[in-house]
């Protein structure tokens, strides 16, 4: 396709419709990708799909993600099997004596693990779901707390993977001088309105100051009742299809060591965070180093034999395959959207409204829509920053404010899109149905986004 047209909007719409209808994110993404390829060249759909999928699988980011997610699943399986995770849940009860305090503990833990949104989403959900289950808090609520303290927190902390990535993009595109990327990034932190508002919103929800609304209210009522609510309509089926409370805990810890020690949970977790920081915020190297120490650490205690640990790790890796498959399908879908020139179409359509005053707000809306439609919170900005930043400079817009709008849109897309990597991993770590998580948290994300839009207009 040589010129961007409104046809590029069709695949994202198809994906959203089929995801809600079928409740199968991977299938919906594949259908959306095929739809886009039909629009590009109906006679070469098979060849183009094969090329797009191979291109994605050769992407270094995908290889990294498969290794990180799979090995994190392996580590989680070890933590559960040794009883360390169960011991943490028991000890956490001393501090979490009710629904509000358990949610606040989840919130604080999400703030503390600010290094990387993947690490945050998987660690916090896996750590806290046994505690929140005890107080009959829905897995949807837990996933929302986890997701809202993943990307939004990582965005506003200048020593995270987000700061490193976007700081590099700013240098590559001439927005910042060499070596000044993080400095320019830090100037924009006060203007990352969506990230700030999302964090504030989730704290208010955890404290019960903002009540559960819409689909989240249904999920909470079902969890408090101890059984899924009656399936009256399709949306209710989406909301209530998860495993809840006692049943989920019993199944997960059936094979766990009931006499597990707390140090067998805390030591690997501290190692993971510490090594990740040590290796310049590289989660993969942090995981490798953690496993290298954790295996002999458990072996010396004779908790399991080496073959048993290998079996547990393989089972843990397998448990992450649904999340990995969803993200791979999302990357294929994004590649098709790029071929349809979706980013260019959205920006071209909104460019008449991009004055110095309105540019930050319009950029936020445009980029948020793109990130939501494609599920790409990083890749889409590598494509659009070379378009947006020269435009901002030409109309005399405030550059830190525009960067803040871009990063706000990125964190919104990462949190709100049901097939974005962060959302998928937050649901996976929390043991929550993916579509159910996306539907229940969307009202809160939209409220924060609306307030951020007004804020950008007022500041500009």
Image: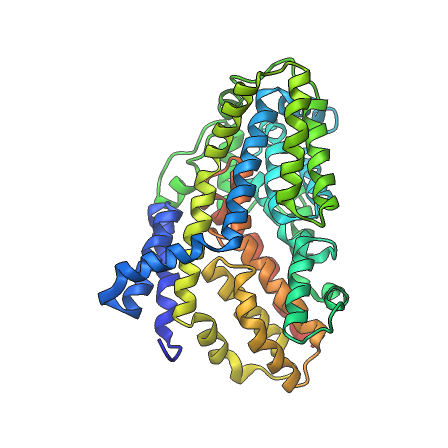
Residue at 52% in and 82% down: 351
At x 65%, y 63%, the residue is: 166
Horizontal side, residue 41 vs residue 365: left or right: left
The residue lying at 69 percent from left, 59 percent from top is 163
* Relative vertical location of residue 345 with respect to residue 292 in this rendering, above or below: below
- Residue 243: where, in percent of width, then height? 46, 30
Q: Nearer the viewer, residue 404 or 304?
A: 304
Q: Quadrant of the C terminus?
A: bottom right
Q: Quadrant of the N terminus?
A: bottom left
Please provide percent x and percent y for residue 420.
50, 53
Q: Nearer the viewer, residue 380 or 12?
A: 380
> In the shown orientation, is residue 341 left or right of residue 188?
left
- Whether 271 is drawn above or below 88: the answer is below
Which image quadrant for residue 449?
bottom right
Figure quadrant of residue 194: bottom right
How far across and how far down the image is residue 225, in percent?
50, 28
């Amino acid at each position: 396709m040589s010129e961007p047209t409104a046809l590029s909007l069709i695949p994202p719409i198809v994906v959203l419709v089929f995801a809600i209808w079928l409740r199968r994110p991977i299938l919906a993404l594949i259908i959306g990708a095929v739809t886009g390829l039909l629009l590009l060249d109906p006679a070469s759909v098979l060849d183009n799909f094969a090329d797009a999928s191979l291109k994605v699988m050769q992407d270094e980011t995908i290889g990294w993600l498969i290794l990180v997610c799979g090995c994190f699943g392996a580590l989680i399986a070890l933590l559960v099997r040794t009883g360390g995770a169960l011991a943490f849940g028991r000890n956490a009860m001393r501090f979490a004596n009710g629904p509000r305090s358990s949610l606040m503990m989840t919130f604080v833990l999400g703030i503390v693990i600010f290094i990387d949104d993947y690490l945050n989403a998987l660690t916090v959900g896996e750590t806290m779901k046994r505690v929140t289950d005890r107080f009959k808090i829905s897995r949807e609520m837990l996933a929302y707390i986890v997701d809202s303290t993943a990307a939004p927190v990582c965005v506003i902390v200048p020593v995270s993977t987000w700061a490193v990535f976007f700081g590099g993009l700013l240098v590559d595109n001439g927005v910042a001088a060499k070596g000044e990327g993080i400095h320019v990034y830090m100037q924009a932190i006060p203007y990352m309105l969506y990230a700030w508002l999302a964090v504030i919103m989730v704290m208010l929800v955890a404290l019960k100051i903002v009540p559960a609304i819409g689909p989240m209210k249904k999920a909470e009522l079902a969890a408090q009742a101890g059984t899924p609510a009656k399936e009256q309509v399709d949306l209710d089926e989406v909301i209530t299809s998860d495993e809840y409370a006692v049943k989920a805990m019993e199944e997960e810890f059936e094979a766990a060591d009931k006499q597990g020690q707390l140090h067998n949970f805390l030591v690997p977790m501290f190692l993971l965070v510490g090594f990740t920081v040590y290796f310049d915020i590289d989660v993969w190297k942090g995981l490798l180093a953690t496993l290298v120490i954790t295996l002999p650490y458990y072996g010396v205690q004779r908790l399991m034999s080496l073959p048993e640990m290998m079996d547990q790790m393989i089972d843990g890796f397998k448990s992450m395959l649904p999340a990995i498959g969803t993200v791979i399908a999302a990357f294929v879908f994004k590649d098709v959207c790029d071929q349809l020139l979706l980013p260019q179409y959205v920006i071209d359509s909104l460019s008449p409204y991009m004055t110095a005053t309105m540019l930050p707000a319009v950029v936020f809306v445009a980029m948020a829509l793109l990130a939501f439609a494609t599920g790409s919170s990083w890749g889409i900005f590598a494509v659009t920053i070379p378009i947006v930043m020269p435009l901002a400079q030409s109309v005399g817009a405030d550059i830190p404010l525009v960067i803040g709008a871009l990063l706000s849109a990125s964190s919104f897309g990462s949190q709100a899109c049901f097939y974005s990597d962060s959302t998928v991993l937050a649901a996976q770590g929390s043991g929550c149905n993916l579509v159910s998580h996306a539907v229940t948290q969307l009202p809160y994300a939209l409220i924060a986004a609306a307030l951020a839009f007004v804020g950008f207009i007022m500041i500009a």
